[in-house]
Amino acid sequence: MSKIKPSKGAPYARILGVGGYRPTRVVPNEVILEKIDSSDEWIRSRSGIETRHWASPEETVAAMSIEASGKAIADAGIDASQIGAVVVSTVSHFSQTPAVATEIADKLGTNKAAAFDISAGCAGFGYGLTLAKGLIVEGSAEYVLVIGVERLSDLTDLEDRATAFLFGDGAGAVVVGPSQEPAIGPTVWGSEGDKSETIKQTVPWDRFRIGDVSELPLDSEGNVKFPAITQEGQAVFRWAVFEMAKVAQQALDAAGITPDDLDVFIPHQANVRIIDSMVKTLKLPEHVTVARDIRTTGNTSAASIPLAMERLLATGEAKSGDTALVIGFGAGLVYAATVVTLP
Amino acid sequence: MAATQEEIVAGLAEIVNEIAGIPVEDVQLDKSFTDDLDVDSLSMVEVVVAAEERFDVKIPDEDVKNLKTVGDATDYILKHQA
Ligand SMILES: CC(C)(COP(=O)(O)OP(=O)(O)OC[C@H]1O[C@@H](n2cnc3c(N)ncnc32)[C@H](O)[C@@H]1OP(=O)(O)O)[C@@H](O)C(=O)NCCC(=O)NCCS
């Protein structure tokens, strides 16, 4: 047997830069109310959402990713050619082949970086970050670009009261690179496929190929509805407030961090009520800055954590070097939580 | 040991106070969670989760809708507690 030379990675990994892109069009609750029987007051009190961004045809998954990534790369102070891998988490890129990551890697000017997409719903950022850390420590890449990007407006049924107001579009990106100190804690992650029905696409794509649209859902004008994301809101809410607070606590424990040591809490921006409940259950002290970007961004799934991170750093509510707990959770159901040092 | 009706109402009162900030003495058997106690559908989920833990019962989502008053919840817990 021949001896294989092992790869050599960095001792640890850290987030070196973050960037975000929010589509130009801001959509207030009034626009949502044109199609559903609801009220601005109800939407604000049940979700915290006041406005969200919806992408234009030009603001594609790739275009938004490139904008966000350009900022993250500049923030990290590296050159795109140094990036060894591009990981894109999305559920709303409608051409499955090839992966959108390859186009992004090319247009950013990487040097033929490895590039691939992952599907991990609203936990996508944490999944991508965990992969990036592994690649860097194991030695397959020196710098990894992790992107969370969604055009959920394309997958929203505007006549569905339970979801019409919830979703938004955008992209968030981070550059992860080598570190001499631990700056990304152990990931507590997992899946609960027995709850796969609680958040899902209404109709699988291949139903449209059959041509028999007789049993497909119709909109109020009698047209076949494009697939959309549906959810059992109460079941998801219960899971999120009860089970995810435990996962967040486990991530703190795994990193050897107490709530007192924490500076920032950046949960997935699914619903401000979930965020408030988690803050209570985790008994986070007053000094911990809590991301509530959902108010003006809506739920952008895989993009929500890096977008919220970028905003907190841009407004000065959080600063470089702060210790932050991040947790993503959603369709799968899947989840991922970890403690990071902010770039 | 199973909780008595008084203990359950007292426990629910503490939970509702914690979640919705309603004074403990306002939580009475005939009070409606949404109309009288300012507990909306999402706070109700939190109340249910806290009650499950406290009284060692399982209250599935489909049963939550039927718990309109403190009395409904108390009866449910009395009947289903382990
Ligand atoms: C979506 C969500 C806000 C809905 O809230 P909810 O309390 O579960 O809503 P319900 O469907 O149980 O309805 C409760 C009441 O509000 C009403 N309602 C529902 N949707 C409404 C709307 N858009 N506007 C006004 N009223 C509405 C219902 O008719 C019901 O009224 P009733 O009690 O008089 O019958 C909530 O379930 C949620 O956020 N869940 C978590 C979802 C999530 O985060 N998903 C993403 C994870 S990645």
Image (cartoon, grey):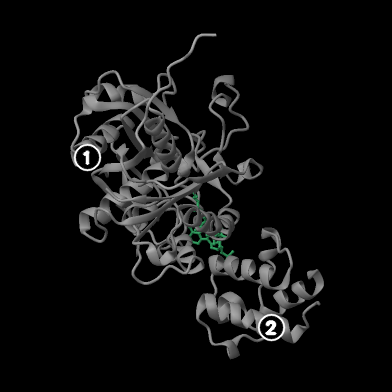
Residue at image point 52% right, 33% down: A224
Q: Is residue B26 above or below residue A136?
A: below
Residue where numbered disc 2 is placed: B9
Please give the residue where the numbered disc 1 appears in the rendered image. A76
Foreground pick, A36 / B21 = B21
Whether residue B61 is situated above or below residue A70 in the rendered picture: below
At horizontal 60% and vertical 55% (from top left) the residue drawn is: A235
Q: Residue furthest bottom?
A: B25
Residue at disc 2, secondary structure:
helix
Q: Quadrant of residue A152 in the image?
A: top left
Residue B58 image label: none
Horizontal relation, residue A250 to residue A18: left or right: right
Q: Give whichever of A151, A7 is nearer the camera.
A: A7
Give the residue type at disc 2. Answer: Val
Question: How far from the left and from the top, in percent, is residue A336?
Answer: 49, 46
**Separation of disc 1 and disc 2 at Cα?**
56 Å
Q: Are marks 1 and 2 on the same chain?
A: no
Q: In the image, residue B62 lies at what x, y percent?
A: 69, 59
Q: Is residue A203 left or right of residue A69?
A: right
Chain of residue at mark 2 = B
For mark 2, does the 10 Å Cα neighbourhood hold few (<14), some (14 to 19), or many (20 or more) residues?
A: many
Percent coordinates x, y for residue B37 in the rendering: 56, 80
Q: Residue at x 40, y 23 (%)?
A: A7
Residue A41 shows up from this direction:
no
